[in-house]
Amino acid sequence: MKLDKIDVRILSELQKNGRITNVELADLVHLSPSPCLMRVKKLQTEGYITGYSAQINIAKLGQSLTVFTEVTLRNHKQIDFARFITAVEKFDEVIECHLVSGGYDYLMKFMTAGIAEYQAIMERLIEMEIGIDKYFSFVILKSPIVKSHLPLESFAKGD
């Protein structure tokens, strides 16, 4: 399926407000409601829309800590990467994990209740013998810019 500018606008509006009504969405993208709904359903069927979720204000729930961690593995065979990912994906506190190029192998993002909880997770990962050679932690003090939507128009080349 090739996306046009209207499809991209639909995706852009939905990522900003997944609870928008079809009538409101249709108005924003300059379509009538029926064709708009048909496009949304097609975008879902084609896998462009993979789900809807709520954005949670974590500060309302209590104290939290965000940590970015660089992880370097001892060995770099496919089985080493697979073993690491299999272990790490079991931790709910790991909210992102990226295989990267450069001076280390993975960049991970943790969200925990505090530094003690983060350190306990790292100690468990080390004890699991999943090939971690070294890691460096970067505790987030403040996040002045965090966007919940992607700049779809800048890389989606619609008609």
Image (tube, rainbow, N blue to C red):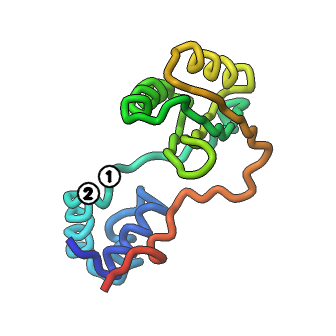
Quadrant in the picture for the N terminus: bottom left
| SS type, badge 2 | loop
Give residue 85's position: percent from left, percent from top: 43, 31
Image quadrant in which you'd find residue 44: bottom left
- The amino acid at mark 2 is Gly
Q: Residue furthest top?
A: 127
Give residue 47's position: percent from left, percent from top: 26, 57
Q: Nearer the viewer, residue 83 or 93?
A: 83
Q: Is residue 122 above or below residue 17?
A: above
Give residue 94's position: percent from left, percent from top: 54, 33
Cα separation between marks 1 and 2: 6 Å
Q: Residue furthest bottom?
A: 159
Q: Nearer the viewer, residue 108 or 3?
A: 108
Q: Residue at x 32, y 57 (%)?
A: 49
**Dot 2 corresponds to which residue?**
47
CB within 8 Å, label 1 to label 2: yes
Q: Residue at x 66, y 17 (%)?
A: 120
**Dot 1 corresponds to which residue?**
50
Q: Nearer the viewer, residue 18 or 150?
A: 150
Q: Residues within 10 Å of mark 1 (few under 14, many from 20)?
A: few
Q: Is residue 149 above or below residue 118?
A: below
| SS type, badge 1 | loop
Quadrant in the picture for the C terminus: bottom left
